[in-house]
Amino acid sequence: MSDHVKLDEEQHKTADVHYRLLVDSITDYAIIMLDPAGYIQSWNAGARHILGYSQEQILTQSVLSLFSEEILNNHFPPSLLCHVAQHGQYEVDTWLHRQDGSEFWANVLITALFEPNGKLIGYSQIIKDLSERRRIDERFRRVVESAPNAMVMVNHHGSIEMVNTQAERLFDYSRAEMLGQKIEILVPDRFCHGHPAKRDMFLHAPQSRPMGAGRDLFGRRKDGSEFPIEIGLNPIETDEGMMVLSSIVDISERKRLEERFRRVVESAPNAMVMVNSRGKIEMVNTQAELLFQYARVELLGQLIEILVPERFRHEHPNKRHQFFGDLQSRPMGAGRDLFGRRKDGSEFPIEIGLNPIETEEGMMVLSSIVDISDRKQKELRIQEALTEKDVLLGEIHHRVKNNLQVVHSLLSLQSSLINDEAVRNMLMDSQNRIQSMALIHQTLYQSNNFARVDFSDFLEALIPTLVNSYSISGKNITLTVDVDEVYLPINSAIPCGLLINELITNALKHAFTDRSEGRISVSLSTKDNKEIQLIISDDGNGIADHLNLDEVETLGLRLVNLLSQQLNGVLHIQRQHPTQFVLRFPLTEH
């Protein structure tokens, strides 16, 4: 029996040694053993590391010597050890002082130790240095405090643990009035009954997300007034358990702007339809309801293709994606006929202006839609009238050309009956002038544009006719024509054509009287699309120096001067080497 007792004592001693070695090896915690009177009996390596006292310095000292009088009065109950013995333990976060006088934040847990028969045998005190955690907490608090939004942290019981200054300003409560209160103090009364259940749902599956997506949320100020808010929820794992940090933004101003935007859209004279990036209708105005004959509730949430004729629906989503890939305000389908579709399936022509709009929900497109049925009907009537006008003008030009041809033929017949060569030459000049005017009307009749004459086509027809009209057989006369693509209005084409007729006729009749060969050049060009330059030159006999061109009596040169004035042009004449007439006149549209 005595051997068994000895073995049991040795085992207890061994276990006690192992326990002391284990306790002494712990450096993260100060583990201090006290006797029933509160005097220190043991002091582990953690206590030496955290508090700075050696075991010799601290043993037999009262545990109360570790705390200043201020700390004892403010953080501990009176008769601390009696309180611990009565309640089993006491825990507090408080300031402690090290042996060197420095201060640190610590967690202190004092536990009463009893024998199985209930006799108090002492106390254990465990101290945890919370300096690093406090620095982290303080950094976190500074971040929360400096946040531009209202920040409210709530524990898993729904009680407010932390707020920042922005939250005080937003809800008109002081910090002291909010801390420890249920979060429902900031929720309007009409939503309070369902809020705890929603809070529990979030804590069951916590994740960072916006609160109440798709719903209007409201906060409640101290005076009971409500205001629209947005809330971001962020779960935070702490030593006290899971908490939720809420970022709260007052969106009253945004709501006012949105309402103003809605009023502008609603009051627009055109149909307005706003579509999100998925092609779903987010907003319409009354004009859109009237235009497409749908009620607003029938359109909201529907794909925009509901308003597109079935024959175009298959390609519309692709065009929609293309627009979202290159966002800019512009008309839709430039150069193409667009059509809308009413509720009854009927189609009608439309014009659409597309405008990208940046919103909180992402990029959207606001479409302004105009029914252009009346315009299309008016355009059709105008087109029909223009077609009739073109037919009429064509007939007029044709008849004028024919009548001029009759006059030309009569003059030709008359000249064949006259023996006087001078009179016959005068009649031939008149024939050529009439022929020149007839060619212009013929060119107009054969073109698609009755307002302007293609002058290069006109000259290609006029010059050979003039050459054939005069007997230059036996002479080698070369005609060079260099004409730009020039279109002249008819009120410029006729005088210009007559002027060219006169100058080429004069050259053919008078420039090569005693020569067997020569050259006539005709050049017509534009200058900066504002001015026409006509140059007619020949290398013939030239114009005599004694001839005063301003007082000349011949009809041809008098016509040249008159026609130049009619064109508002400036005529320059070079008498010889070569003989050259240069006319510049403005290019007009009418």
Image: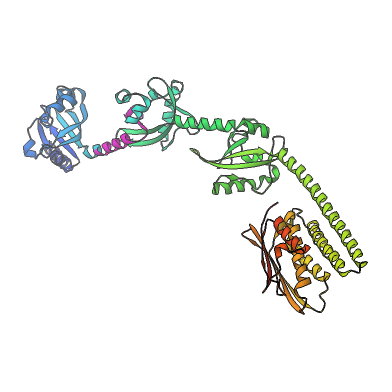
User: Looking at the image, which residue sits at the far front?
Assistant: 546
Q: Is residue 231 visible?
A: yes
Q: Quadrant of residue 61?
A: top left
Q: Which residues are magenta?
A: 135-162
For the image, the number of numbered tags is: 0
Residue 160 sits inside the magenta stretch: yes
Q: Is residue 364 left or right of residue 508?
A: left
Residue 352 sits inside the magenta stretch: no
Name the residue nearer the viewer: 386 or 255.
386
Identify which residue is drawn at 58% across, 49% down: 322
Q: Quadrant of residue 494?
A: bottom right
Q: Quadrant of residue 587?
A: bottom right
Name the residue nearer the viewer: 16 or 390.
390
Percent coordinates x, y for residue 480 in the rendering: 72, 72
Identify which residue is drawn at 84% across, 63% down: 431
Percent coordinates x, y for residue 477 in the rendering: 76, 76
Q: Is residue 118 visible?
A: no
